[in-house]
């Protein structure tokens, strides 16, 4: 029987809330029947095997509180699909602030922005060791370069694998990737893709147009949302790595790169009433047969944090599988499938095949000695695996379940619950 997967969470925001809710939700639902899981079982591990043993944050409404309460505290505003959580002994500990809080946050209401705790930061590496954590899931705010590096170093010191969900380049940084490889610690990163979000939609359309022989001339992707991620990104100085991550995720699908002036991808604006709902406006322009101009416009509306949790749960299990097999360094197949800025970009179809090979233990990395691991995908990868055609389902439903949203009142007092659904 497989052991449990013990994880730590850095940043108890909306994404952490969706993940923790999901761990409880699937304990009460048949994971092979319920929606939302790419792999009900991955390498012998099910979602029920994941256990949170440590959590870190810097907000005074979360630090010192039990995790099952902290995930619903302000300024979290994600959809609540699992209100009742099992009581846990995990208390949110104070992490280092460093550059984790944007300077403009204090100009926004308490229930919308971070509020710094006056608790003393803990030693992260010691806290990880004491908890017995095997994998750290990093959910820190965009632009937290120093803070994410601090947690990465703590992982290296404590012997803990890492799933880096934010656009601070750790797995795709050659020096840091090398450190994880030397320590024999797996890392999946960087910058989580949603289960079906703006980046994936943009990549699919881009690659399909290329395969159909047209010449893409220009494109944009504009995103709006009302969670702290979008508020945080109003500070343009924190956006550099995010724009690189999202742009490269699309550029990598082009046969010929677009010039900077012909591609624009990134957050557009903060709209408070959207809460955790993210809306993407996408436009692509191309020339087809006879150089005739054509274009496409699309609008996508998703609940941002649950959308990423469905991928993170696979990334956690891949990291654990690599620990079991004594594989260190960036997991290229998992990262290419699940992250916007992996060390090695792949086409989505190729990445899917590589991931399935890794899970089954049929990839070259699994069988290679630790010091002989290669950063390159085997050229014969697609020839060795029988690929089933992907079934494309219509994502539009005639109606949407109304789900409760938490933590969004305007006076900063008690929680006010209401239907947070944004019509699309």
Image (cartoon, rainbow, N blue to C red):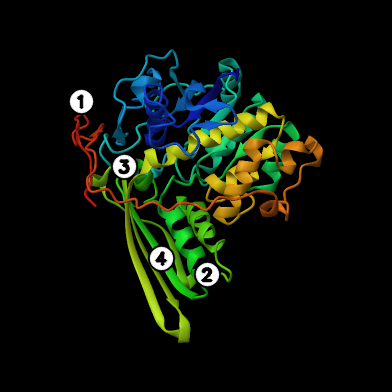
* Alpha carbons under labels 1 and 2: distance apart: 52 Å
Residue at coordinates 41% horizontally, 14% vertically from top-left? 88
Q: Secondary structure at mark 3?
A: loop
Q: Given the current orientation, which residue lies at the most extreme bottom position?
A: 290
Q: Earlier in the sequence, mark 4 or mark 1?
A: 4
Between marks 3 and 2 in the image, the one whose residue lies nearer the viewer = 2
- Mark 3 sits on what residue? 276
Q: Earlier in the sequence, mark 3 or mark 2?
A: 2
* Alpha carbons under labels 3 and 2: distance apart: 33 Å
- Mark 1 sits on what residue? 414
For label 4, count other residues whose C-alpha is less than 10 Å away and answer few (under 14), some (14-19) or many (20+). Answer: some
Q: Earlier in the sequence, mark 2 or mark 4?
A: 2
For label 2, count other residues whose C-alpha is less than 10 Å away and answer few (under 14), some (14-19) or many (20+). Answer: some
Between marks 4 and 1 in the image, the one whose residue lies nearer the viewer = 4
* Alpha carbons under labels 4 and 3: distance apart: 22 Å
* Alpha carbons under labels 2 and 4: distance apart: 16 Å
For label 1, count other residues whose C-alpha is less than 10 Å away and answer few (under 14), some (14-19) or many (20+). Answer: few
Vertical position of residue 133 compared to residue 327: above or below? above
Quadrant where the N terminus sits is top right
* Alpha carbons under labels 4 and 1: distance apart: 40 Å
């Amino acid at each position: 029987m497989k052991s449990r997967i013990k994880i730590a969470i850095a940043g108890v925001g909306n994404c952490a809330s969706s993940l923790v809710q999901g761990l409880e939700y699937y304990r009460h639902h048949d994971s092979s029947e319920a929606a939302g899981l790419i792999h009900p079982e991955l390498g012998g591990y099910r979602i029920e095997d994941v256990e949170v043993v440590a959590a870190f944050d810097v907000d005074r409404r979360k630090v010192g509180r039990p995790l099952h309460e902290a995930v619903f505290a302000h300024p979290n505003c994600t959809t609540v699909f699992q209100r009742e959580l099992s009581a846990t002994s995990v208390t949110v500990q104070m992490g280092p602030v460093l550059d984790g809080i944007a300077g403009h946050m204090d100009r926004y209401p308490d229930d919308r922005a971070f509020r710094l705790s006056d608790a003393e930061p803990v030693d992260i590496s010691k806290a990880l060791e004491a908890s017995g954590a095997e994998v750290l899931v990093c959910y820190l705010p965009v632009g937290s370069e120093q803070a994410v590096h601090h947690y990465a170093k703590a992982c290296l010191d404590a012997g803990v694998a890492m799933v880096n969900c934010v656009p601070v380049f750790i797995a795709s940084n050659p020096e840091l990737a090398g450190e994880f490889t030397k320590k024999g610690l797996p890392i999946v990163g960087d910058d989580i893709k949603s289960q079906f979000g703006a980046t994936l939609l943009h990549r699919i359309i881009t690659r399909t147009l290329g395969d159909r022989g047209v010449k893409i001339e220009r494109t944009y992707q504009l995103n709006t949302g009302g969670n702290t991620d979008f508020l945080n990104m109003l500070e343009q100085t924190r956006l550099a790595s995010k724009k690189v991550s999202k742009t490269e995720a699309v550029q990598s699908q082009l046969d010929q790169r677009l010039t900077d002036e012909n591609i624009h991808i990134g957050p557009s604006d903060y709209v408070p009433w959207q809460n955790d709902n993210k809306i993407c406006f996408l436009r692509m322009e191309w020339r087809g047969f006879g150089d005739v101009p054509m274009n496409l416009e699309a609008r996508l509306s998703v609940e941002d944090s649950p959308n990423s949790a469905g991928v993170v749960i696979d990334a956690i299990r891949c990291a654990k599988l690599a620990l079991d097999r004594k594989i260190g360094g960036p997991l290229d197949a998992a990262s290419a499938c699940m992250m916007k800025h992996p060390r090695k970009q792949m086409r989505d179809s190729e990445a899917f095949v590589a991931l399935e090979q890794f899970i089954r233990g049929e990839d070259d990395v699994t069988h290679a000695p630790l010091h002989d691991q290669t950063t390159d995908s085997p050229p014969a990868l697609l020839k060795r695996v029988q690929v089933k055609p992907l079934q494309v389902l219509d994502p539009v439903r005639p109606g949407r379940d109304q789900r409760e949203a938490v933590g969004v009142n305007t006076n900063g007092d008690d929680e006010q619950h209401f239907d947070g659904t944004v019509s699309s």
